[in-house]
Image (cartoon, rainbow, N blue to C red):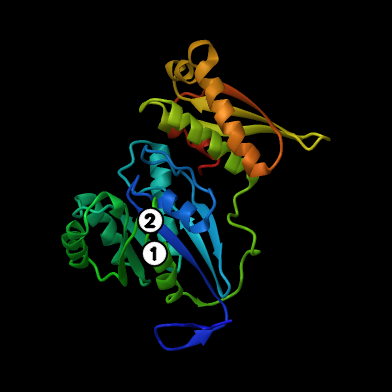
Amino acid sequence: MTPISDKKGGSATFRSGFVSITGRPNVGKSTFLNAVLGAKVSIVTAKPQTTRNRIIGIKTMGDAQVIFVDTPGIHRPKHGLGATMVREARRAIKDVDVVLYMVEPKPPSKGETSIIKIFEKLKKPVLLLINKTDKVKKPELLPVIEAYRGLYPFEEIIPISALKGDGLDSVLKELLRFLEPGPKYYPDELVTDRLERFMVAEIIREKLMEATSEEIPHSVAVEIMGWEEKKTGAVLINANIYVEKDSQKGIIIGSKGSTLKSVGTRARADVERLLGTKVFLELWVKVKKHWRDDRAALMELGFE
């Protein structure tokens, strides 16, 4: 095993640490995490603010283990759920060893500047990842890099394309330089600490977001109500889908149940791949008015 050299010239046979992936909504944090792990642990859609909980992803290599925390996008909250998401993101930044700050390949906005101000109070390394470089020409990146370099003393600035897999090895290589000698927190084969029930609920929510309009996605929560393993090895799963309005319930069910049936079919296929067995999935749509601003409801659904 080749020891890892750190910036101070030392070495250790094994290193580990916690790394947050932070940034504004829809910059590609979940896509990056899934690509680095080589497995899908965080839902990915074209709609912003899809990550609601702190997702733990585990990357184990021969001489190191990196524990990634994929946080909700930092944004101006419009309801109780949004405020909870932002609190989670800010807490994750404080609790980790290294911060990966992800942005798109365009000049920093006021929102980006406000996030960078959070870093000024941190005493830990922050690496800037400029994602989605497959969408711009290389000369267009130079002024973006210079603009960010003038805002904060990032340890490294790394252009990447999480979608194409470009630059991911460079990110891992740079991260290892900042990890301290430490234990192996998780077994080699584990890629996330999330329970299967949580992952199944996220799969269902992803399919709902893909199938519905702009109004629906962020008004939806999924709760696993039943999980029964049959003697045959098959799993029977019952899930409630909560929305805030009767009109939203109708949209999710669709004409003669067509939308809900499509969501169930597509979700079941992914769940079967996750669990490696036959799955029977039953979905029920229920109205829980104003649940995003109801602290009791947020606690019940695992957001508080």
231 sits left or right of 167 in the view:
right
Residue in the picture at 63% in, 64% down: 186
Q: Secondary structure at mark 2?
A: strand
Q: CA distance from mark 2 to mark 1?
A: 7 Å
As drawn, 252 above or below 124: above
Q: Determine if residue 301 is in view.
A: no
Q: Secondary structure at mark 1?
A: strand
As drawn, 101 above or below 249: below
As drawn, 129 above or below 75: below
The residue under label 1 is 99
Labels 2 and 1 touching (C-beta < 8 A): yes
Q: Quadrant of the N terminus?
A: bottom right
Amino acid found under the numbered disc labelled 1: Val
Q: Nearer the viewer, residue 165 or 293?
A: 165
- Looking at the image, is mark 2 or mark 1 earlier in the sequence? 2
Residue in the picture at 37% in, 38% down: 46
Where residue 42 appears, as percent x and y from the top left, is: 50, 47
Amino acid found under the numbered disc labelled 2: Thr
Residue 188 falls in image quadrant: bottom right
Outermost right residue: 231
Q: Determine if residue 194 is in view.
A: yes
Q: Nearer the viewer, residue 207 or 292?
A: 207
Where residue 144 appears, as percent x and y from the top left, is: 19, 59
Where residue 68 appears, as percent x and y from the top left, is: 49, 60
Tag on residue 22? 2
Residue in the picture at 44% in, 49% down: 30
Crowding at mark 1 (Cα within 10 Å: few <14, some 14-19, many 20+): many
Tag on residue 45? none
Residue in the picture at 43% in, 49% down: 31
